[in-house]
Amino acid sequence: MTAHPRFSLNQATVKYASLAEAIVATKSAGIQAIGTWREPVAEIGLDAATRLIADSGLRVSSHCRAGFFTAPDGPERVASLDDNRRAIDETAALAAAGAPGSAAVLVLVSGALPGGDRDLIGARERVRDALGDLEPYAASAGVTLAVEALHPMFAADRCVVSTLGQAIDLAVDAGPSVGVVVDTYHVWWDPDVLAQIARAGSLGRIASYQVCDWLTPLPADVLLGRGIPGDGHIDFGPITRAVEAAGYTGDIECEIFNEDVWARPHDDVAAAVSAAFTSVVAPHL
């Protein structure tokens, strides 16, 4: 079985797999790249994780996730910035262990409104400040910080950055080692998305492209409403062509949060999402 050469399995798609199990599933489907997550890496330690990656022969397409920058000044904010520096170090180590073509890209989710806070503008400013604080450290480590905009339904409880345009603005303000994630699930609804993808490309800021589908009806936990490409409402052609025209040449991850997908055998999921990518997304590359 051979996957598209630019396809990457984001580890969230096989959430209940250990890193070792995720690597086996990725390779069983002929996939050449994997997007790692911090929790499975932490379970075995960074040294063991880098050895697994090095022995696998896989590229690392990104490391997920850090961020969570919206706390006001105080111990919680200091702890968040320290954790992000550790995540930067992890990203550099995993990318160095991966096969040639690995990307030292750390995906960032900005964080929610702090408890009881309604100051969305202020929360976004704290995200901007945190990115500016972290950019020199990321640059010294050779890591790109990739700001991910999440769908506006997550603005209160998960991510105050809601559009690709906002993410680009933050990246530009922070410095050259900050880019953006284009995730179809989060941006497909945006009437300005194609123009913003072109803008991100012109600025050299597209750090990652992630694909999954939007399913309806949404589940009670809307976070878990992602589907395999082709199973929902997203037209992958225009977005994929725009990302390509913008100059992005890196791996393309499939990242799915869905309990039904997670319940399936890991090898079956890897094969299914790879086949879906080949039929639904790859024709537009």
Image: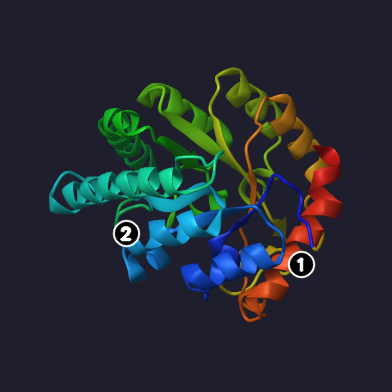
Q: Which residue is mark 2?
A: 47
Dot 2 amino acid type: Asp
View extreme (top): residue: 202
How far across and down, in percent of the image, does residue 111 sit? 38, 51
In this rendered view, identify the residue nearer to me: 228 or 142. 142
Observer able to see residue 223 = no
Indicate which disc, 1 or 2, sits on the residue closer to the N terminus: 2
At 28% from the left edge and 32% from the top edge, which residue is drawn? 129
Q: Quadrant of the N terminus?
A: bottom right
How far across and down, in percent of the image, does residue 279 sit? 86, 53
Q: Quadrant of the C terminus?
A: top right
Label 1 crowd (10 A; few <14 / some 14-19 / many >=20): some
Question: Looking at the image, is 178 positioned above or below residue 96?
Answer: above
How far across and down, in percent of the image, does residue 259 sit? 61, 76
Task: Give the colouring mode of the picture.
Answer: rainbow
> How far is mark 1 from mark 2, CA to CA?
31 Å
- With 127 as the anchor, is 225 left or right in this view? right
At 62% from the left edge and 62% from the top edge, which residue is drawn? 256
Label 2 crowd (10 A; few <14 / some 14-19 / many >=20): few
Q: Which residue is mark 1?
A: 272
Q: Quadrant of residue 237?
A: top right
In this rendered view, identify the residue nearer to me: 105 or 44. 44
Give SS at disc 1: helix
Question: Looking at the image, is 194 positioned above or below residue 270?
Answer: above
At 35% from the left edge and 64% from the top edge, which residue is drawn? 48
Dot 1 amino acid type: Ala
Question: Looking at the image, is 71 positioned above or below residue 157?
Answer: above
Give SS at disc 2: helix
- With 62 as the anchor, is 244 left or right in this view? right
View extreme (front): residue: 55
Q: Are marks 1 and 2 in contact (CB under 8 Å)?
A: no
